[in-house]
Image (tube, rainbow, N blue to C red):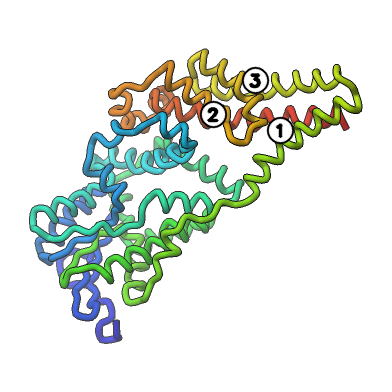
Amino acid sequence: MNKDNQKKENQLSNENLTHIKLKDRDVYLLGTAHVSKQSVEDVKSAVREIEPDTIFVELCPSRYEVLVKQDAWQKMDIYRVVKENKALFLLAQLGLSTFYRKIGEKLGVRPGAEMLEGVNQAEKTGARLILADRDVNITLKRVWSSLSIWSKLKFLSHLALSVMFQGNIEKEDIEKLKNKDQLQLVMDEFSKSFPQVQKTLVDERDQFLAHKISTGVGQKVLAIVGAAHVPGVTDYLDKEIDTAPLTSTPPKPVWPTVVKWGVPILILGLLAYGFLVHGAEHSVQSIYIWVFINGVFSALGVSLALAHPLTIMSAFVAAPITSLNPTMAAGWIAGLVQAWVKKPIVADLENLPQALTSFKGFWLNPICRILLVVVLANLGSSLGTFVAGTWIATRVL
């Protein structure tokens, strides 16, 4: 892109539309707010005035399926989520979507409505539709792996607060987000707490979106993206981008594996040392401490989720055993028991989006409860392991 063909603001009526001459192609970037009725109208007017032959939308196949298929939640296999240890990951996804959903309810517009309108306009006009965003699962995994333990706890607390969010948000506040300077200021503030999230959530996707648009088909194209992406996408459009690093799943760190195997070995070593030095009775008492503390902490965690009594009992029994077995987790056992005794029905799945709009609904929905059981059982077991292990160590050493 030479100087003569540098970006210029389009003379069309939409002030959020940026026109870029990319060699022999006309690329129009439409910056939108994801929960804005005006953004939906902006998409309609942009398609009408530009008459694009290709429409790019800031969606990946996974998000596209959720957006266009209202029954997507009904097809979720909760047993598979528990068995594959994805409960916390799913809770994070639900938390991220809840904030936008609550704003959408206040403003009477569905989150992502402008992207859905782009899909509909492609069908109506016969324009090619291209899903231009990176897979959301890769994005979330890269975000999660980039955070430290403290940042992960802080990030989860932000997600939890988004579930309980009750603030007043006016339409004018959302429309201001389409102002590039205002939105960039918001992202700068956010990046102070989570700089890694800023890089993965925005910067990397700017590159991915730009690559998709620049290498895609079409002579006159309209790219519908969140306003935060417009400056970055504009800068990267004329650059060669290697997407392989952007789509790879970061390698798992070594320390969780070391902890997962090291703690059981340490506990078993303490029990064996106690038996050799202090005798059988002392060792049996240490075992009682291990079983009781581990079981109680895990059971208390499950109780906070208002789980079934059988689930609470299963957590108590499983925690002392699974804490010494790195291939298992108390949350898996408790979650599967909860799903068995309170098997979710279709209505529970259908009600999931509504349940996430209030703290009470979230806590009482059977699907959310299963996820909470898994997370809280594992958290309780981890705390129990620390307390019981410390107690045993002070008795033995």
Q: Can residue 91 be spotted in the picture?
A: yes
Amino acid under disc 2: Gly
Q: Which of pointers 1 and 2 indicates the residue nearer the eye? A: 2
Residue that carries the numbered disc 3 in the rendered image: 296
Question: Hey, which quadrant is residue 384 in on the image?
Answer: top right
Q: Secondary structure at mark 1?
A: helix
Q: Which of pointers 2 and 3 indicates the residue nearer the eye? A: 2
Residue that carries the numbered disc 1 in the rendered image: 386
Distance between the Cα atoms at labels 2 and 3? 14 Å
Asked if residue 301 lies left or right of residue 368, the reply is right
Residue 331, label in figure: 2
Could you classify mark 1 by the number of other residues whose Cα lies within 10 Å: few (under 14), some (14-19), or many (20 or more)? some
In contact (CB < 8 Å): disc 1 and disc 2: no
Answer with mark 3 or mark 1, whichever residue precedes in sequence.
Answer: 3
Q: Secondary structure at mark 3?
A: helix
Q: Nearer the viewer, residue 187 or 152?
A: 152
Q: Secondary structure at mark 2?
A: helix
Asked if residue 195 lies left or right of residue 359, the reply is right
Q: Nearer the viewer, residue 244 or 118?
A: 244
The residue shown at (44%, 25%) is: 369
Q: Nearer the viewer, residue 144 or 37?
A: 144
Amino acid under disc 3: Val
